[in-house]
Image: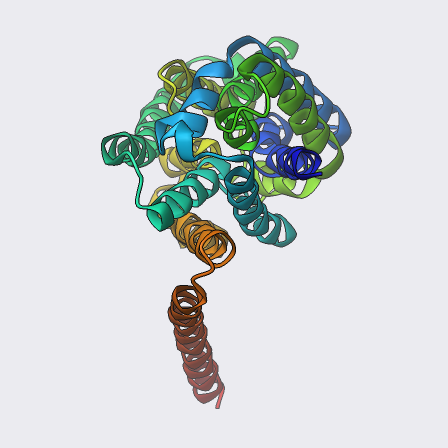
Amino acid sequence: MITFTGMAIAFFFAMNIGASGAAASMGAAYGAGAVRSRHAALCICGVGVFLGAALGGGEVAKTIGEGIVPSSIMTVRLAIMVLSSACISLSIANRLGIPLSTSEVTVGAVVGAGVALQKVYLSSLAAIVAFWVLVPFAAFGLALLSGKAVIAAEGRFSALRRGNRSRWLAGLLVLAGLMEAFSAGMNNVANAVGPLVGAGLMTVSDGILYGGLFVAAGAILLGGRVLETNGKRITDLSLLEGSVVSGTGALLVIGASLLGIPVPLTQVTTSAIIGIGTARKGFSLWQKGLIKRMLKVWAVSPVFSLVIAYGLVKGLAHGDLYSVIAVASVFLATLGSISLFHSVRREKQSLNEHGEGI
């Protein structure tokens, strides 16, 4: 029963990964109009995700399973607690339609469990966090520079202009989106099956195969809202700009996957989209509320899953209810303070607007 429960939670999490992270990989192609059907875009994403998982997802799975905490403590029960914590965080984000980093959520949950048991590989964790910071910045910088080059090229060659809808440009963008989905399979499938691999519940090859199937299914069946968010609500993209976004994301994530580093795919993709938009429209793009909202969720997600995992391990594995109550109290107090701050802020804005109207 516990084995069945672990697999069920892992595959449910895999579907949520498909709906959140993997679906974002086709956002550029869909937003630029290279693939006009939302269902077709999600199906292309599903194919790319499965191929990436089956052909190159093993290294990241090993990192999640045994590279952050010792494999000796990654029991089936602990794997279930880690996956449950990650599922709760990711499900909330999916309900809001926000592309959340499954890597941050999963690593946060693994670290929370490791902290509760006082066994975490700090050097490996530091390397992962460094990649979390550097890779999105690299995506933004590369896309910004490429966006400037695209503007210059469009000024010289009419075939590249934003209004153009040539088939070869559309084909290039679809190919770039497929490669980004492939990179999602290489990197993100491990987030669902890595804890089970570390617990010895399945082999690496079986884990990435079955995990790839469920992530692909999640992208196809549940990824519509995140596809809309990444494709059309951040900035308009030309076909060539969309190719830059997807190509940049694919290259960076594939490189990290070969090193066995779980990276925030949605941050890479969205940072590249913001970089392209900044090249075209300047930094006024950063004023959009959606971007600010995503940045807040990205900052909270690993801490949120870490606290949940820590509480589950302390409460269920150790029976230390006092620690659980203390952590939960601090966590709820923090959330309450943040909520109160935003309520006061909204009230002040409302009063200012009312005063201006008078």
Residue 216 coordinates in the image, percent (x, y): 68, 25
In the displayed image of the protein, which residue is found farthest to the front? 319
Q: Quadrant of residue 54?
A: top right
Residue 26 coordinates in the image, percent (x, y): 60, 27
- Pick whichever, 191 or 204, lies toward us: 204
Q: Quadrant of residue 322?
A: bottom left
| Above/below status of 100 relative to 210 | below
For the point 58% across and 30% down, the residue is: 22
Judge left or right: residue 293 versus residue 4. left
Residue 210 coordinates in the image, percent (x, y): 67, 21
For the point 33% across and 35% down, the residue is: 132
For the point 64% across and 29% down, the residue is: 30
User: Which quadrant holds the N terminus?
Assistant: top right
**How many numbered dots are placed on residues in this image?**
0
Residue 84 coordinates in the image, percent (x, y): 58, 46
| Above/below status of 188 relative to 222 | above
